[in-house]
Image: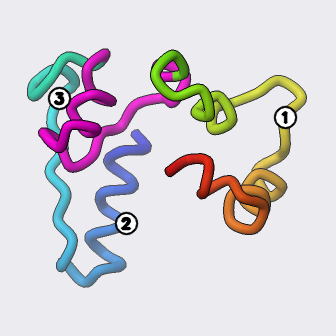
Amino acid sequence: MPAVMATDRLRFLSGGRIDIRLYKPGRLVPPPEIFDAISSGNLDAGFRAPAFNVGKHSALALFMAMSFGPEGPEFMVWLHHGGGLELHA
């Protein structure tokens, strides 16, 4: 599961200084409300596919899987050196 792997990796790489608690889907807020809960400051972070929130922020369409879209390395170059992070903010 990607969320568990990311949590374990962050904990390891930070020497335990970063400790993320994972909750079962829907335990804190219903999945469709994750974006709003983070935007309002009620949650620090959430794990959800960007596709579900395109109606709230159209640039999120650029951060989901696209048919005939860029391969992983191309996407990462665009994200870090082509303005992708600025759009995501």
- The color scheme shown is rainbow
Instruction: Check the image and report above or below for 60 versus 71.
Output: above
Residue 35, picture quadrant: top left
Please state which of the two labelled residues, at mark 1 or mark 2, is closer to the viewer.
Answer: 1
Are the residues at dot 1 and dot 2 in contact (C-beta closer than 8 Å)? no
Q: Which residue is mark 3?
A: 24
Say left or right for 62 vs 54. right
| Amino acid on which disc 3 is placed | Lys
Q: Residue 17 magenta-drawn?
A: no
Are the residues at dot 1 and dot 3 in contact (C-beta closer than 8 Å)? no
Q: Give, as a single range, the part of the protein colored magenta.
A: 32-53
Instruction: Check the image and report above or below for 23 versus 21.
Output: above
Q: Residue 74 appears at what percent x and percent y?
A: 83, 55
Q: Secondary structure at mark 1?
A: loop
Instruction: Check the image and report above or below for 15 versus 41.
Output: below
Please state which of the two labelled residues, at mark 1 or mark 3, is closer to the viewer.
Answer: 1
Q: Which residue is mark 1?
A: 69
Instruction: Check the image and report above or below for 1 versus 72.
Output: above
Say left or right for 56 vs 81. left
Q: Secondary structure at mark 3?
A: loop
Q: Residue 19 appears at what percent x and percent y?
A: 17, 65
| Amino acid on which disc 1 is placed | Gly
Q: Give the quarter of the figure containing the N terminus.
A: top left
Who is closer to the viewer here, 88 or 50?
88
The residue shown at (19%, 78%) is: 16
Q: Which residue is mark 2?
A: 9
The residue shown at (38%, 56%) is: 6
| Amino acid on which disc 2 is placed | Arg
Are the residues at dot 2 and dot 3 in contact (C-beta closer than 8 Å)? no
